[in-house]
Image (cartoon, rainbow, N blue to C red):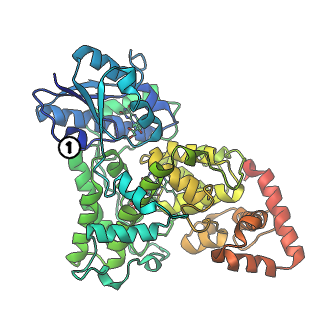
């Protein structure tokens, strides 16, 4: 045998760099469902089902293509409980010339794999992950010398570099780089949101559902009604479904929230892009082609491409540039533990209840729920970054450290002191009222800031601004907020701060 090729659970791509010049007659693939990866956080049960089922289907596809695949299915009593143990056993058995793998997506495992040549006494070749538009080195070169990183400038570079939504003379399609201001309509039920794409579980998925129910019953979330794609063909159908039915309205309602609809016009493609069933390139190409055919407006295609070519690449680059120190940052000094209702949804704040309940049922909540509801509340309440990061890593089907950490620690918690974002995404109940219909169903009154029934977001918002005045008053993007605060009568400010103090002392009871 020549090479042993390790494929991780989020590397389910036939074009993976580790496989690209492989020879099925002489090389061998190793894949493993292992306890350590399945339990380093309280992974949502649907995430475990998706990954194990997709891994098993991918291994079958490799076998059909002629590869020999050593595959370890999960069992709690497996002799090998870590990827290192599995690989060590295969190295001993086959004595390969080399172990080949593709850069892994998270720092923890990456550091471990980089020790394997010594620990396992085998040559290890780690290849770049070419599924991203920008390599780690390209991003590092772009970031060099910049005190703060801004997604918008990186995104423009990426548009120029890829030619996506660019005109023949090198300008942005439509004359503007960014149609963000056309992405903020409130959704009032019309046009109707499309039904989400569904795949009925096949035999493999049903076996995995049983396995997860048996061995991971203590994990967060429900395994009921599992309908995610688990193969590349199914994921491509999910992409086509999105382009036909949701993308036309994606731009308009990108920031909207609804009390009735879990998915609205979002793509729900992150679970597939992140585990390798779809490439970012094909997803962006599909959106741009729909625009060129006249099937979707520019604010939809651009808004969508910006999320992938812009935000997704940006947070990944930032992660590798700054780890491991980034994970330790806590520039606002937040120490409060995460309220228990993040795990149960058991709160009278309707927007939080709906976002957490959807998360529990689906392993999914869309970006504005993550940023402006669960995230905003954690920011305003001063939750310890490590606690809230671990929550986001656990509860979403698409969650991996490289993408979750910058989004949570940087974008939501501003714990990096503004390296990723120019100002914190802090907002009062008014924002939630403007973008959703939650407030009509809520126990609390959004128009009120100080009474017992006042929307907690209101007093917490002003309390946040007041207690962090030193950090933010000098920020030109926040001048107006402080002006509004300072304009209020002293008695009112006092009443709001008193309500804020009370809320912070009683988070568990809200
Ligand atoms: P759409 O709204 O349809 O967007 C299209 C695609 O753009 C997504 O599939 C995703 O690949 C990409 N995208 C959009 N926003 C971002 C972003 N901010 N960062 C990176 N990619 C983005 N996304 C993850 O994939 N994994 C995570 O663990 C994750 N954790 C997050 C934690 C917090 C606190 C926040 C605020 C955001 C997080 N996001 C994460 C980003 C975003 O919320 C999800 O990518 C998005 O909700 C996935 O749903 P969708 O596929 O329907 O996205
Ligand atoms: C997230 C995850 C889970 C739950 N299980 C496995 C597994 O059993 N085997 C595996 O190879 N990978 C798994 N993964 C993904 C890894 O934990 C890790 O996040 C990525 O491989 C990083 O690129």
Q: Position of residue 119 (x, y in %)?
A: 40, 21
Ligand 2, by image quadrant, is: top left
- Residue 422 vs residue 357, the one in the foreground: 422
Assign the N terminus to one quadrant of the image.
Answer: top left
Residue 325's place in the image compared with 155, above or below, is above
Q: Hey, which quadrant is residue 414 in on the image? A: bottom right
**Residue 254 visible in the current orientation:** no
Q: Position of residue 34 (x, y in %)?
A: 39, 26
The residue sitting at 82% across, 62% down in the picture is: 499
Q: Which residue is mark 1?
A: 14
Mark 1 lies on a secondary structure that is: loop
Q: Is residue 234 left or right of residue 73?
A: left
Q: Is residue 331 left or right of residue 391?
A: right
Q: Position of residue 227 (x, y in %)?
A: 34, 46
The residue sitting at 20% across, 43% down in the picture is: 14
The residue sitting at 28% across, 43% down in the picture is: 230
Q: Is residue 88 left or right of residue 236?
A: right
Give the residue furthest to the bottom: 175
Number of disc labels: 1
Q: Position of residue 306 (x, y in %)?
A: 38, 68
- Residue 346 vs residue 495, the one in the foreground: 495
- Residue 283 vs residue 395, the one in the foreground: 283
Give the residue furthest to the front: 145
Q: Hey, which quadrant is residue 76 in on the image? A: top left
């Amino acid at each position: 045998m020549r090479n042993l090729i390790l494929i991780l659970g989020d590397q389910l791509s036939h074009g993976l760099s580790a496989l690209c010049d492989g020879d099925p007659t002489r090389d061998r693939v190793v894949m493993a469902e292992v306890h350590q990866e399945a339990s380093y956080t309280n992974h949502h049960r649907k995430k475990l089902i998706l990954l194990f089922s997709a891994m098993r289907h991918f291994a079958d596809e490799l076998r059909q293509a002629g590869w020999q695949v050593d595959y370890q299915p999960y069992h709690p009593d497996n002799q090998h409980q870590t990827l290192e143990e599995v690989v060590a056993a295969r190295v001993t058995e086959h004595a390969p010339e080399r172990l080949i793998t593709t850069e892994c997506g998270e720092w923890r495992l990456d550091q471990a794999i980089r020790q394997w040549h010594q620990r396992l006494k085998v040559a290890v070749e780690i290849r770049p992950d070419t599924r991203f538009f920008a390599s780690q080195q390209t991003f590092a070169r772009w970031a060099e010398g910049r005190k703060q990183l801004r997604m918008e400038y990186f995104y423009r570079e990426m548009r120029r570099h890829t030619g996506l939504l660019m005109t023949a003379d090198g300008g942005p399609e439509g004359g503007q780089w960014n149609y963000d201001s056309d992405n903020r309509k409130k959704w009032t039920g019309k046009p109707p949101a499309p039904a989400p794409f569904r795949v009925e579980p096949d035999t493999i998925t049903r076996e995995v559902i049983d396995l997860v129910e048996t061995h991971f019953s203590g994990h967060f979330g429900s395994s009921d009604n599992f309908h995610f794609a688990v193969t590349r063909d199914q994921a491509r159908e999910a992409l086509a479904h999105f382009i036909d039915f949701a993308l036309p309205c994606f731009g308009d309602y990108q920031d909207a929230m609804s009390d009735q609809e879990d998915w609205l016009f979002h793509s729900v493609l992150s679970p597939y892009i992140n585990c390798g069933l779809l490439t970012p390139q094909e997803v962006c190409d599909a959106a741009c082609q729909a625009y060129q055919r006249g099937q979707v407006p520019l604010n939809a295609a651009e808004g969508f491409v910006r999320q992938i070519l812009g935000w997704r690449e940006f947070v990944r680059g930032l992660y590798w540039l700054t780890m491991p120190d980034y994970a330790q940052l806590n520039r606002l000094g937040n120490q409060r533990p995460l309220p228990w209702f993040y795990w149960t949804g058991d709160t009278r704040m309707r927007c939080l209840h709906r976002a957490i309940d959807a998360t529990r049922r689906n392993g999914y909540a869309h970006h504005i729920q993550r940023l402006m509801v669960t995230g905003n509340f954690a920011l305003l309440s001063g939750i310890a970054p490590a606690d809230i990061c671990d929550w986001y890593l656990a509860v979403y089907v698409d969650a991996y450290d490289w993408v979750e950490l910058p989004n949570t620690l940087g974008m939501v918690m501003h714990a990096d002191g503004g390296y990723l974002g120019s100002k914190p995404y802090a907002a009062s109940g008014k924002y939630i009222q403007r973008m959703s219909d939650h407030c009509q169903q809520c126990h609390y009154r959004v128009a009120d800031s100080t009474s017992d029934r006042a929307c907690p977001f209101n007093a917490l918002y002003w309390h946040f601004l007041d207690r962090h005045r030193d950090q933010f008053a000098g920020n030109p993007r926040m001048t107006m907020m402080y002006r509004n605060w300072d304009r209020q009568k002293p008695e009112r400010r006092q009443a709001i701060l008193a309500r804020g103090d009370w809320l912070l002392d009683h988070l568990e009871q809200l």
